[in-house]
Amino acid sequence: MGIVLSFAEIVGAINKIVLGPVTLFLIVGTGVFLTFRLGFLQVRDLPYALKLTFSRSKKDKPDQGDISHFQSLMTAMAATLGIVNMLLLGAQ
């Protein structure tokens, strides 16, 4: 039982380092850097992205097996939320 306890202490110490304020600063700093470096891409192209996601294209004929942009977005969001949900429930 002593080995398991010491392993748990090691994992806890690593967890405090990895998920601490330094990591948060690096993630936010990277986001701000990329926002400026790419010329506010997420703000500049947001109207086009929303139009593409929520409108139907007249020239695209839906073939069997094709999914729309909206269905693709929802699938990606469901996968992301599912992974986050598993991580948060696993951390309890």
Image (cartoon, grey):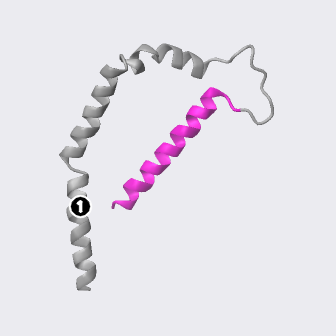
Q: Secondary structure at mark 1?
A: helix
Q: In the figure, is residue 86 to the left or right of 39?
A: right
Give yes or no for residue 91 being in the magenta stretch. Answer: yes
Residue at 63% from the left image edge and 33% from the top image edge: 71
- Residue 47 location, x and y as percent? 49, 14
Q: Quadrant of the N terminus?
A: bottom left
Q: In the figure, is residue 41 to the left or right of 65?
A: left
Quarter of the image holding residue 88?
Answer: bottom left
Q: Which residue is mark 1?
A: 14
- Residue 43 location, x and y as percent? 39, 17
Q: Is residue 9 placed above or below 87 in the rendered structure?
A: below
What secondary structure do most residues of the magenta stretch adopt?
helix
Residue at 53% from the left image edge and 42% from the top image edge: 78
Q: In the figure, is residue 39 to the left or right of 9?
A: right
Give yes or no for residue 12 being in the magenta stretch. Answer: no
Q: Give the farthest residue toward the bottom.
A: 1
Q: Is residue 16 placed above or below 32 in the rendered structure?
A: below
Residue at 27% from the left image edge and 34% from the top image edge: 28
Q: Is residue 52 placed above or below 27 in the rendered structure?
A: above
- Residue 75 location, x and y as percent? 58, 39
- Residue 92 location, x and y as percent? 33, 61
Residue stretch rendered in magenta on the structure: 67-92
Q: Give the farthest residue toward the right.
A: 64
Q: How many marks?
A: 1
Q: In the figure, is residue 78 to the left or right of 42?
A: right
Label 1 sits on what residue type?
Ile
